[in-house]
Amino acid sequence: MDVLFVLTSHDKLGDTGKKTGFWVEEFAGPYYTLKDKGVNITLATPKGGKAPIDPSSTTEDASTKDTQRFNNDPEAQERINTTKKLSEVNPADFDAVFYPGGHGPLWDLATDATSIKLIETFYAQDKPVAFVCHAPAALKHVTAADGAPLVQGKKVTGFTNSEEEAVQLKDVVPFLVEDMLKENGGHYTKANDWEEHVVQDGLLITGQNPASSKLVAEKLYEATK
């Protein structure tokens, strides 16, 4: 099985002067969940090269067994530093695609034409598309074959407004994931803040927050079998 991971290239947290990027747990949890099942994983970003890590995701509070494993895994770190350029990736080479979150995707993947086309192509080829936390931002401008938003009428989740408020970035981000999914016609559901919550609607799999990342990967694996 071959799965494509699409990570953000964006590392600026709005006008705050602080850094952002992808959230380590949302990469590491799914990465090892799938890798340990023998899945071949390819990493890509809009710009290629080094995918920026959100510094907030490397703190002790955000540490998990999988982030610790990543910290001691030179091969995985090298792969993060040498991602493929998204425009050079062929969807035909993969069975599914997964988008880790972090705030970065709100700025680049939400509007990246190559990413939008990639998701639409995977979906049209009956291949699972999965997103966790802020990564459903990448679905903002993705449409179905009939031109309607891909999430319209589908069960979805993603980082909640209240979770965004809790991390004090509600007024920093370009848009709120929960609001966007609802505005695009998605049937949005959520659990309590920071609790695991994953929903699947056919080929579309979404997770609410970092705690949901491994279950998203499990569902993605099942959906490709």
Image: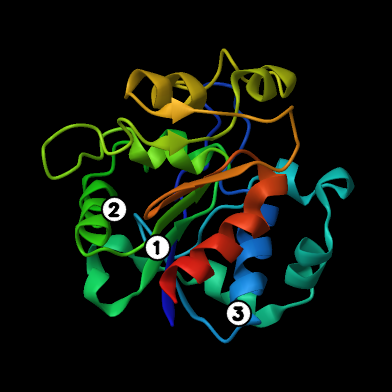
For label 3, the residue is: 35
Q: Is residue 116 left or right of residue 106?
A: left
Secondary structure under tag 1 reads strand
Task: Give the camera-side residue of 113 and 160.
Answer: 160
Mark identifier at residue 163: none
Q: Residues within 10 Å of mark 3 (few under 14, many from 20)?
A: few
For label 2, the residue is: 119
Q: Is residue 89 left or right of residue 36?
A: left
Q: Amino acid at mark 3?
A: Lys
Q: Position of residue 27 (x, y in %)?
A: 61, 59
Which badge, 2 or 1, is on the more N-terminal residue?
1
Q: CA distance from mark 2 to mark 1?
A: 8 Å
Q: Amino acid at mark 1?
A: Val
Q: Position of residue 208 (x, y in %)?
A: 61, 38
- For the C terminus, the quadrant is bottom left
Task: Give the camera-side residue of 4 and 21.
Answer: 4
Which badge, 2 or 3, is on the more N-terminal residue?
3
Q: Position of residue 185 (x, y in %)?
A: 33, 24
The extreme top residue here reads 171
Q: CA distance from mark 1 to mark 3?
A: 14 Å
* Snapshot quadrant of residue 102: top right
For label 1, the residue is: 97
Residue shown at the point (78%, 72%) measured from the top left: 69
Q: CA distance from mark 2 to mark 3?
A: 22 Å
* Snapshot quadrant of residue 42: bottom left
Marks 2,1: beta carbons within 8 A: yes
The extreme right residue here reads 60
Secondary structure under tag 2 reads helix
Q: Is residue 99 above or below residue 223?
A: above
Q: Amino acid at mark 2?
A: Ile
